[in-house]
Image (cartoon, grey):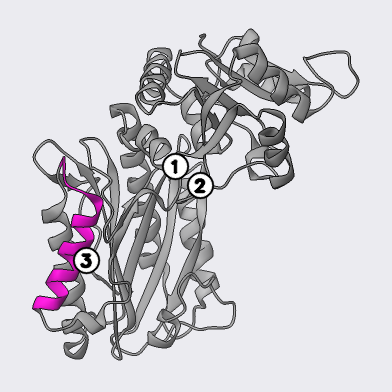
Amino acid sequence: MRQSPMLEYSLSEFEGRMAKAAEKVKAAGLKCIMGTSKAMVCYLTGLRSVAWKSKLSTPGLIFLGADGNYGVVGSFSAVDTAMYTTCLDKEDFYFFDASGRYGVALNYYDALCYTLRHLGFTEGKIGCELSGGFHLHMDIAMFNDLKRDFPDLEFVDTTELFWDILAVKSEAQLKNMRDAEEVNRKAVAKGLEVIKPGSMTEMELYKEIAKAGYLAGSEHFTYMSVLAGAERALCADCPASEAVVIPDAPGTTVRVEGGAIRRELNAPFTANIVVGGVQPEQQPAWDLATGMIESAMAAVKPGACAGDVADAMDAFASAQGKAEWVVQPGYAGSGIGWGRIDGPLLRKNSKFALNTGMVLTLVASVRHDSVGVLTLRQNVVVTDSGCSFLNGKTSDPLTV
């Protein structure tokens, strides 16, 4: 391995990541894993590229064996970017070139086949990203061709193993996620400063908050949802409207959801800006959602199952006699970092074990006529004794 100009973390951290991942691959009884997603490739190698946004190509695919051997497959046109951003040596890359002048093959598929054979990954089980939040960054025809041409390889779904590799964050990663949450705080503070209920549209507020996020240090800013009022609050994940003017009636809640990104890591946020403060008829919804978040936090600790957190949130709502208010029973949030929603999913019956260093986003959504849908979010870090805020409490109402 080597230090490249744009390597986001220390060389020793990448060496540790690769070694620990190989140990987990071996413990799972696999010959190797095939990582096609940005999360896996970037985590293990540091490979950065705008091509990750493409639906037609991928800047790199990694094979990592239980024996610790690895190789990244990609196009020769991406070799300089790979050398400038990753921790890998040039011989760790297996590139194709349609001209035949460079690389190991004329096309991507043949390069994949060459690499599997060269590394000796031709029989046994190969773990793949096939469910639970991952998308196989490969067209299905090519995937089926691999299964056909490597009959002694058993392609199996190891999504939970992939999340296990990615979930625990290093101190350097935690710092970047805390920095991202601080960007969120500054961006929302700007929104509070400039919002004009009665005359400003959702889209106008969106632009002010997004601009502030970039200026505060976000490398990217997750496309936000800005919803003003009880009717709009029902429209989950709906984009901001250029036509909807933010109402100025007391109790109007403007829900803003998005997330800053630092060093490829995402810290999502949900901010609830309330015109004139929470009104008496809205307080029961706020009390329920707040209690659900606090109950979930109490259930987060090393060794607990992801399903325990969802159970705690549901149990609180049931004890209050308001189980029917809960929008997503059996769900309490998820891991975060590589996306707004990562593994583990905190859902009923999940046996995924929580470990120190995981970063989770706890989400409580309740439905009531006074608010439409009220969604609270709190990001936490799993500690040795339970959990703590990632970077302060973020679930309180923001009065304007």
- Labelled pair 2, 1 in contact (Cβ < 8 Å): yes
**189 is higher (above) or lower (below) than 105:** below
Distance between mark 2 and mark 3 Cα atoms: 32 Å
Residue 159's disc number: 1
Which type of secondary structure does the marked residue at label 2 adopt? Answer: loop
Say which residue appears at 23% left-offset and 61% top-offset.
Answer: 310
Say which residue appears at 39% left-offset and 21% top-offset.
Answer: 26
- Residue 138 x, y percent position in the rendering: 67, 41
Q: Nearer the viewer, mark 1 or mark 3?
A: 1
Q: As shown in the figure, which amino acid type bears the numbered disc 3? A: Asp
- Residue 237 x, y percent position in the rendering: 48, 69
Q: Which of the marked residues, 2 or 1, is nearer the chain's N terminus? A: 2
Q: Nearer the viewer, mark 2 or mark 3?
A: 2
Q: In front: 222, or 53?
A: 53
Neighbourhood count class around disc 2 (C-alpha, 10 Å): few under 14, some 14–19, many 20 upward: some
Please tell me whether the stretch drawn in magenta is mainly helix, strand or loop: helix
- Which residues are the magenta region? 302-319
Q: Nearer the viewer, mark 2 or mark 1?
A: 1
Which type of secondary structure does the marked residue at label 1 adopt? Answer: helix
Residue behind mark 3:
396
- Labelled pair 2, 3 in contact (Cβ < 8 Å): no
Residue behind mark 2:
134
Q: Is residue 316 magenta?
A: yes
Q: Quadrant of residue 383?
A: top left
Q: In front: 84, or 357?
A: 357
Which type of secondary structure does the marked residue at label 3 adopt? Answer: loop
In this rendering, would 77 be left or right of 364? right
- Residue 379 x, y percent position in the rendering: 27, 52
Tell me, yes or no, if residue 376 can be seen here. yes
Q: Is residue 216 magenta?
A: no
